[in-house]
Image: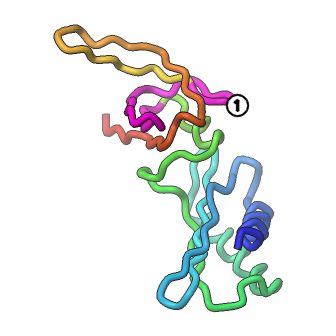
Amino acid sequence: MSELKQAIEEIVEKHLPDESHFVVEVNLVPKSGKTVLSILIDADQGLNVQTCANVSRAVAEELEAKELMSEAYILEVSSPGVDYPLSSRRQFQKNIGRELKVLLTSGQELKGKLLEVDTTGVKMLVKKKEKGKKATEEEVVLSFEEMKKTIVQVSFK
């Protein structure tokens, strides 16, 4: 199945409008006798519905032409939702300046502002609260390996 996912990902990448768009994830999940082909795409400056529709049509046409999906399937092309964990360096880069909630592999949870992203990890400004003391802010460097799950915090300010 991983060869099929790789082939589909290559097809999706070919049909993205430009270099500012990228593939987040391709999943094939059996559901009610059919396979759901779920494709998540994103863009550095945000994604619109029309782009998802265009990519969906182009991918469906190529899948049919190449006969890659032997059985009935449902195709879903969308962007990751606000509660979808960040998974690629590019997604982190896109969210510099935003508040993140990070669950570390150690089980510790941090909340703070994303300051920088490099090839190995991120730098965040994290608020430290100690009982009986005024909250302070501290820069923390985290590697991608020590971050288990990272969610962008939605702000309505």
Can see residue 15? no
The verdict on residue 23 being magenta is no
The verdict on residue 106 being magenta is yes
Q: How is the image coloured?
A: rainbow
Q: Quadrant of the C terminus?
A: top left
Q: Residues within 10 Å of mark 1 (few under 14, many from 20)?
A: few
Answer left or right for 96 relative to 63. Answer: left
Image quadrant in which you'd find residue 101: top left
Instruction: Examine the residues drawn in magenta and state their main secondary structure.
Output: strand
Q: Residue sitting at 73 percent across and 74 percent down?
A: 58
**Where in the figure is residue 123, as x and y percent of width and height?**
55, 23
Image quadrant in which you'd find residue 76: bottom right
Q: Residue sitting at 54 percent across and 59 percent down?
A: 79
Type of amino acid at the residue the image marks with label 1: Thr
Residue closer to the observer: 93 or 33: 33
Answer left or right for 145 relative to 102. Answer: right
**Where in the figure is residue 67, as x and y percent of width and height?**
79, 87
Image quadrant in which you'd find residue 145: top right
The residue under label 1 is: 119
Q: Residue sitting at 21 percent across and 8 percent down?
A: 133
Can see residue 47? yes
Q: Quadrant of the N terminus?
A: bottom right
Determine the residue located farthest toward the top in the rendered image.
133
Residue closer to the observer: 128 or 18: 128
**Where in the figure is residue 114, as x and y percent of width and height?**
50, 28
Answer left or right for 8 relative to 83. Answer: right
Q: Residue sitting at 60 percent across and 85 percent down?
A: 73
* Figure check: 25 above or below 73: above
The part of the chain drawn in magenta is: 98-122
* Figure check: 54 above or below 47: below
